[in-house]
Amino acid sequence: MSSTTVIDLRRIAKQLGLPEEGVLAAVQLIDEGNTVPFITRYRRDQTSGLDELQLRSITGAVGKARQLADRKQTILRTIEGQGKLTPELREEIDAAENTKVLEDLYLPFKPKRLSLAEQAKQKRLEPLAREIIAADSQAADLEKRAADFVDDDSGVATAADALLGVGHIIADLFSSRADVRQRLRKLLFQKARLRSLRIETPGKALTKTAKHFRDYFDFDEHLQKVPPHRVLAMNRGERAKVLRVRVEGPTEEIQTIVDELVIPTDHPHADFLKGCCRDALSRLILPSLEREVRREMTDASEEHAIAVFARNLRNLLLQPPVAGRIVLAIDPGFKSGCKAVVLDSCGNPLARDILHVVGKVEQKTAAAARIVELVREHGCNVIAVGNGTAGREVESLLSELIVGDLQEHNVAYVIVNEAGASVYSTSQYAREELPDFEAAYRGAVSIGRRLLDPLSELVKIEPANIGVGLYQHDVKARHLHASLDAVVEGCVNYVGVDVNTASPALLRYVAGLNQAVAKGIIDWRAAKGPFTSREQFREVPGFGDAAFVQAVGFLKISEGTNPLDATRIHPESYQVAERVLEKIGASSAELVDREKHQKISDAVGEIDLTSMADELSVGRLLLADIVEQFLRPGRDPREDLPEPLFKQGVLKFEDLEVGMELRGSVLNVVDFGAFVDIGLHDSGLVHVSQLSSGFIRDPYAAVVVGQSVKVWVLELDKTRRRVALTMIKPGTKPVHGASRGRSQNPRKKFAANSTQKKSAETKGSPSGRGQRKPGSGPRKGTKQDRGGRTYTSRPDRKKAKKPLTDEMKTGQAPLRTFGDLKQFFDIQTGTDDSAGKKPSKKKKLNKEVQEADSAEATNHSVTQGSLDEPHVQHVAAKDSEDTPAGAESPVKPNLLQDSKKNISVESEKGPSSQVPDATAPTLEQQSGEDSSKDTSQQ
């Protein structure tokens, strides 16, 4: 090839909304083999302060751009090998901005299977097709000209057979045109709807599986408005052979567009070509575009689901540790009893037993006595209770003991997410750490250690088994694992690791290390004792120079020979750190002296970072990080977060009243709200509209998993014992002008020629949210900045409605206002609100909860009967196994369906039985497929 396709990094920077110099430097650093955590922490000056999420978005965008570039080169080589590559085509291929456009250009040259068109070409009918398209005078009389191609040896017995084959060739030519596909793709995105219908089996009752998909038995919504969880739910219903899913577009408009594009004005064979267009649409173009649309919707929904999982996982991993506590960990259970293990402050098991809290009174009494004995004997001051089966029964027993026999011990209990505990209990890690324990007890140990140090314990479990996701069992496992591994890696390196106490599971996520090097560190510790200097890492087998540079800054040594080894300062910056300490009249040895450390803190506060950075010839961001370590050497960033919610009593459903104030812990966050544990058997739902009195576009920005929140009871469903909660204090007026509806659908990214959502231009907060640069002034197009301000609500001023006059009602007098226009329409439709009542608030709330009510729908893993939607893997659910997804049932595309006319799509495999003609019977009649009425669901 004489030319090569290059990646335009400036274009990627513009798409992501990031500084060009930062993107260029980041790509160069990544290509040199540097890890994202290392670049995030120690190369901030080069990358203009890009944070981890921004760097990973660059990595993903560059990866896709390189895949596109590689595909371009492959296509160019293929077409050039066919001798059909023209300068214009090369230019179009090089300019293609996405895979869809590129594949459209390649389609005419793509090697084809033995299609109907290829079969017709083998019968030597292509010349006739060319004559018809070109309006050649030889083909003025189609029937007569077609008779010239009759050949029994070729399988063309009649002129009709010849025209049929010619129609297939022309339909294939129309289908291969890039302009046709691009126009229709754009139209479908703008106007098509996604529709699902129940597949009914005569004589069979509705199965339990089918009942899960009731909401989708007659579902119809615009493509751009279908939220991700609905896309994944319909996919699951389709795989279960319960639903038939279609993409439906405007029939007449589609036909008109194609006719205008492919049939010249006043063509002598326009009717024949229109028949070919109908065949191309129903048999080739629309089925292909439907598969493409469905695939892109699924991909976008899966990306969203993975992002939800990653966000919740990050919040779960970064929950603050509960240090210095002696824990009684209980893994609840019914038949086999509750496994109880006492752990010291380092997580080492001290005692274990089995408790039966459900069953005979004697067993419950014995269990209570044993709990009291364990607490008194070992001095336990907190009890960790898994949130699985029998968890609420354990809570009830503990509540009685806390106000009874344990009252003097000041004991509290915490509900711990036990998802994945059973997976850990049978893993290699568990067998190596607890060889003398049975699998059941290992699960209890894991629950207790999750309270002591969530990050150190959860890294031992495959991230996908931690149930804080959105349909995680329906997304591609490879993509899910890659994303979640990146989250775990980011969290581990964000917190840092004490190299002398870390487990192999934790060490393997340190930047630059792998499983083998992690094991080497453990073996070195076992043979030579604790590390005392970072330089000793070089003695570990496999810990080469490259790994040392990447990992050393994240590996801390608490009591080493050099106090800087206990900080996040990289050894390559030790000289800079010493010079800074020298300038403020201190030394590194004073960092570990509490009395002298205060002097360092006071002196550091007087440093002018800009002038000192220039004086030392170092980056300002690097200097700021060094100074931060002087203020809090070796700090754990999780210490700044609030502790878990400690409880001393259990709540009963009968105790609840509307308006009651409660404290709860956020279990899971999804698109439509958050699930909060308030101490009931089931969690309560805070709908997205109830997260704040103002507009909430993104529920993930309002609350995070593990957060302790104040809620009020909004509604009680006594029949199903479910609770709707609100985080809006009763009596609070909504912020003026704030929309209370569902947040904007995040899933418009499957649009044709779509662009990626811009990221923050400057380094964001730890959550990844960008911040505007100070002093950047107001945003363009606004009269003021978007800084913090106080909003007030206007007092209610109800104006009396002026009734319409008789002349207005009969059209003899003009209407005065839009209010008059509404009254007029209300009178015409019989829905004048002056005669009726507005829907009650309770009905509105019921509608908000209805989505979550459909939860039983497709969720194979929810075991606690929460208000959760079907797509949510509930954080409180015990480990479960999803039903293995079967092969996806074939979809009968029907893109041309509307209320006036329906063209059913036939398979490429089924040969047509008549010559394509606009006056021939419709393809709907040929296929015999029933058309469905176009319904919509609000």
Image (spheres, rainbow, N blue to C red):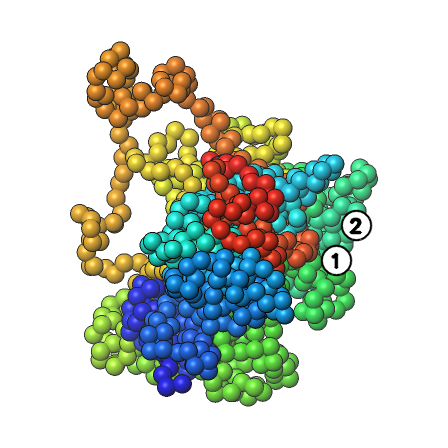
Image position of 221 with respect to 109: above or below? above
Farthest residue toward the left? Answer: 783
Q: Residue at x 59, y 34 (%)?
A: 722
What type is the residue that disc 1 sits on? Ala
What type is the residue that disc 2 sits on? Ser
Mark 2 neighbour class, 10 Å CA radius: few under 14, some 14 to 19, many 20 or more:
few
Q: Residue at x 60, y 57 (%)?
A: 911
Where is mark 1, residue-wise? 440
The picture places residue 230, in percent across and down from the top left corner, at 53, 46
Marker disc for residue 63: none
Q: Earlier in the sequence, mark 2 or mark 1?
A: 2
Label 2 with label 1: CB-CB less than 8 Å: yes
The picture places residue 97, in percent across and down from the top left corner, at 37, 67
Q: Residue at x 31, y 20 (%)?
A: 824
Where is mark 2, residue-wise? 336
Q: Of helix, strand and loop, which one carries label 1?
A: helix
Q: Nearer the viewer, residue 737 or 556?
A: 737
The picture places residue 524, in percent across and down from the top left corner, at 61, 83
Q: Quadrant of the rendered structure where residue 178 is? A: bottom left
| CA distance separating discs 2 and 1 | 9 Å
Image position of 811 with respect to 675: above or below? above
Mark 1 neighbour class, 10 Å CA radius: few under 14, some 14 to 19, many 20 or more:
some
From where the camera sits, is residue 366 visible? yes
Q: Residue at x 41, y 22 (%)?
A: 838
Q: Is residue 348 left or right of residue 915?
A: right
